Image (cartoon, rainbow, N blue to C red):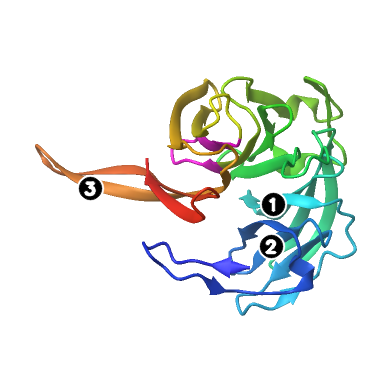
Amino acid sequence: MIGLHATAGATPYRIAQSAQLQGRTALTSLPNASLVATASQANLTVLVTPGGTVATPFTADVFAEPWGTIYAAHAGTQSAYASNARTGTIDRIDLNGDAQMSFTEIATGFSTNQGVPGSISAPSGLTDDATNDTLYVVDTNANRIVALRNVSAIGTDGVVVSGTGFSGAATASAEVIASGAPFNGPISAALLVNGDLAVGNTLDPAGTNLLIEISPTAGAVATKNVDTGAGGAIFGIVAVPITITTMGANGPVNTPTNQIYFNDDNSNCVVSLTQ
C-alpha cells in the first residue's frame, strides 16, 4: 500500500506491505485514520492502522474476491461497504471505531468477474452520499450506475438484481440512475460537491478514456476526455471538495468545487483535475 501527497512531483511512500494485501483493489479511510482495504487475491478485507500495521478483524466474514469498498456514516451509524467480484454481492460491515458490530450481505445479483485477463466485470466504484444515506454502485458489465437508497437499513439480501430489474424486501431502495451510452466498462466513481458523480469509463466507444459526470436525477450531464491513448487507463478516482475565491463587484466570491484525482495507467501517473 502506497501513499502520495497531493502535490506535483510528490514522492510515493510505503504505508504497509503484507501478503494479506495481495491483489489490493480499493481502500477507504475511517474517521480515526485507519484504512479498510479490499484484497481480491488474498480474499480478505483488512484493516490498516495509522501506523501501518495490517490487521484482519473481519476474517470471520465470508468474502469472494472483495473488490470495492467505501466508508459511510448516517444518523449515528458507521459502516464499511464491500463488493465482491466473484459473487456480485454487496456487504455491509457495521462498525464501532475499528471494531465490527455486525456483517450483512445486503445485495446480490450484480455482474461478476468474467475471467477475462485484464478485465474485471464486478460491482465497483462504491460511493456514499451521507446526506441522503445512498450508496452508488458502478455495475461494470451492465454499463450502469445503481443507487441503493436508505442503504443503512437494507437487511440480508434485501436487494436482488435480476437483469434490468430488482426484487427482494428492499426493492424500492434500488434504482438505476444511468445506463448505456456513453458507458462502456465504467469502473470507478467519486461524489462531487453538487451531489453528482464523476465516473471513470474504461473502454468508451472512441477508444479513449472519459470522465463522465452523472446526475442522480438527469443521467449523464458532461464528459471529459482525459487520455486519448489506449482505453482502460482510468481505474481509481477521488474527489476532494475545495473552494475557489474570485473577486466580484461586491468583494470576494467563494465558489465550492472539486479537486479530482485519478490514476492514468497509460502514463503511470496520478493526475489532478480541477472541475
| Residues at circles 1 and 2 in contact by the CB criterion of under 8 Å | yes
Which kind of residue does numbered mark 1 sit on?
Thr
Residue at x 73% of width, y 28% of height: 174
Task: Give whichever of discs 1 and 2 has the lower sequence position.
Answer: 2
Q: Is residue 185 left or right of residue 19?
A: left
Q: Is residue 77 magenta?
A: no
Magenta range is: 190-202
Cα distance in 3D space between marks 1 and 2: 8 Å
At label 1, counting other C-alpha atoms closer than 10 Å, the crowd grade (few under 14, some 14-19, many 20 or more) is many
Q: Secondary structure at mark 3?
A: strand
Give how far across and how far down residue 194 sits, in percent.
44, 36
Check the picture and name the quadrant holding the N terminus: bottom right
From the viewer's perspective, tell me whether residue 156 is left or right of residue 20.
right
Q: Which residue is mark 2?
A: 36
Q: Quadrant of residue 224?
A: top left
User: In the image, is 136 to the left or to the right of 86?
Assistant: left
Task: In the rendered structure, find residue 245 and report the number of the disc placed on it.
Answer: 3
Q: Which residue is mark 1?
A: 69
